[in-house]
Amino acid sequence: MTQAHSLSSLLEESKRLTTHLTLAEIPAVQRGIDLLESESRKLVARSVRSGRGVVDPRAHSFLASSGVDADGLADSAAPAALLSAFEMLQPTYDANVESFLAQQHEQSIVNAIEESELSTLDDFDSGMAAHMQQVWDDSQRRLFEELGQYQGHAYSTAFMNQSEAAIPDSSALTGNARGAFDLDSNGGMSVTQPRVERYAQVIRGLNDARVTAASRSVAATPQYDLLKGLEKATADSARELKSRQIGQVWTLLAHYYAGNDASPARIVSGACAYLEETFAEHVDRIVAQYPHDANVGGVPSIHRKVRGFLDVLFGRLGRVPQFLEVFNSEAIWAHMFVLYRCGHRQELLKYALEMEDIITDSDPGFVAHLKAFLDRASSSSSSSIRSEIPITSSSSSLEDPYKAALYKVLGRGNVPKKATQEVIQTTEDYLWTNLVLIRDADIIAVATGHPRNTLDALQTLMLKFSAAHFDPNGNNPLLYLRVLLLCGLFENAVDYLLQIDRYQIEA
């Protein structure tokens, strides 16, 4: 039997169930939804017009049996807005243009805020991902640079061995034992970074020299210039480092090395010699950079170079002090100070003797003081200084800043700091002045009657200044490294250099 036949049979059987009911009071229900809605609205309308709803007696009896006041309930429900109980089946449209535009405006603002929020979240996620990738790349680069991108032996052992092998003392230069940091082709470290490889070649050469020395007598031990090799390796890496200052560090350390002498006096004298050599090179560069202004000729003497340097300094560069003592268009005190600043002591003495008549008009006792001072400075003994250089308090005018600066480093009377500000301007000039006062402390103390300047005091002052004083913007981090090395603070210098990612290999 099919489904259609079953439904039809059920319909016919349901109709036969009511055939015996012929009562007229039970009409057949033939009302649709529309008719029900219409009748409901009519019922509501009648209830509103009468002011109160019609309560069925059976409902009244039911509520009364339950203890509910049916009359009061009807009175309280009468004001209810029954018309609002039915909603329109068709939507109504607001014909007010202003409210429509306001609603659209608010909706546009809400949509814009939601879109901006989503865009901000997307930008934040992408920015965070890019930042994390950048941090990882930087960390990976620093790690590879520190480890030298090696494979094989542990880094800690290799680094300790490398540090021991790179100490520039006499045992390292002429040792008879092969260093532990030996980079051979069989089982050593495989270095792929060019900068590390250059330093590794220097250490390899040092180790080869040690092996050679071990098979020979002490007298025939070859000298291996470790500092020269490191300086060359750094020079070859200048383009990678984007700086040539690190190479100057090896040159400075070479001035300190002299056998086993590592005394403070050796450190101070080596630092002074380095600063004097670098200033002489600076004079040569200025003269070569402005040949027409310097006008020193083909093969100039040291005095022609100094005159040319001062002509450029006072002319093109415009660094003219407020007052200068000049004779025949030549700044005599500035000339002598530059000679002494370059370390040309004997040339300074010869120049002072040639210009003695003119210098005597400014300071009658200066030439004699200079000669005695340089004689005692070149002597290994400081005895009898008091008899040769008595305590002086020159009444000569110190308006010329070069004259004041020369008096200060030669112990010629009491010179206030303000008098030399126009000459002592750079960090190198400041350090040189203090180191010279320490180098010749015994002579200057006797000549001026002041306490001796000490290296410990200068070291304490430089550590108090810290790197932020010399490099506040972080543009020249190696300047403070040179300051520490010039003051003999080698451990502090290595620790400071280790904090700079780019120079950890050199550290």
Image (cartoon, helix red, strand yellow):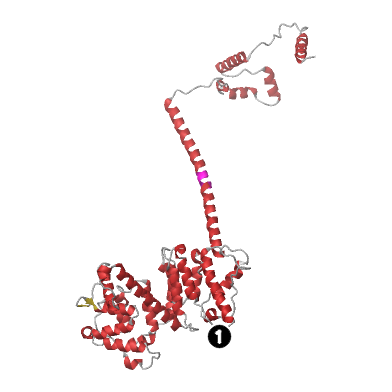
Confirm whether residue 463 shows in the render: no
| Amino acid type assigned to the residue bearing label 1 in the image | Val
Q: Residue furthest left?
A: 328
Q: Please indicate whether residue 34 sits to the left or right of residue 450 in the image.
A: right
Label 1: which secondary element:
loop
Q: Residue 213: x, y in percent?
A: 56, 81
Q: Residue at x 50, y 42 (%)?
A: 119
Query: Could you say which is closer to the camera, residue 131 or residue 92?
Result: 131
Query: Magenta segment: does it hold 122?
Result: yes
Query: Magenta segment: does it hold 89?
Result: no
Q: Please indicate whether residue 161 sits to the left or right of residue 407 in the image.
A: right
Q: Residue at x 57, y 62 (%)?
A: 149
Query: Could you say which is closer to the camera, residue 174 or residue 409?
Result: 174
Residue at image mark 1:
218
Q: Please indicate whether residue 168 sits to the left or right of residue 343 in the image.
A: right
Q: In the rendered image, which quarter contains the N terminus?
A: top right
Q: Residue 43: x, y in percent?
A: 60, 15
Is residue 321 positioned above or below 390 on the image?
above
Confirm whether residue 343 shows in the render: yes
Is residue 231 positioned above or below 373 on the image?
above
Q: Residue 100: x, y in percent?
A: 45, 27
Q: Residue at x 51, y 65 (%)?
A: 195
Q: Residue 71: x, y in percent?
A: 63, 22
Instruction: Read off the magenta span.
Output: 120-125
What crowding class fits label 1: few (fewer than 14 Cα within 10 Å), some (14-19), or many (20 or more)?
few
Magenta residues, dominant SS class: helix
Q: Please indicate whether residue 330 sits to the left or right of residue 175 in the image.
A: left
Query: Could you say which is closer to the camera, residue 419 or residue 97?
Result: 419
Q: How many marks?
A: 1
Picture quarter containing residue 459? bottom left
Is residue 179 positioned above or below 140 on the image?
below
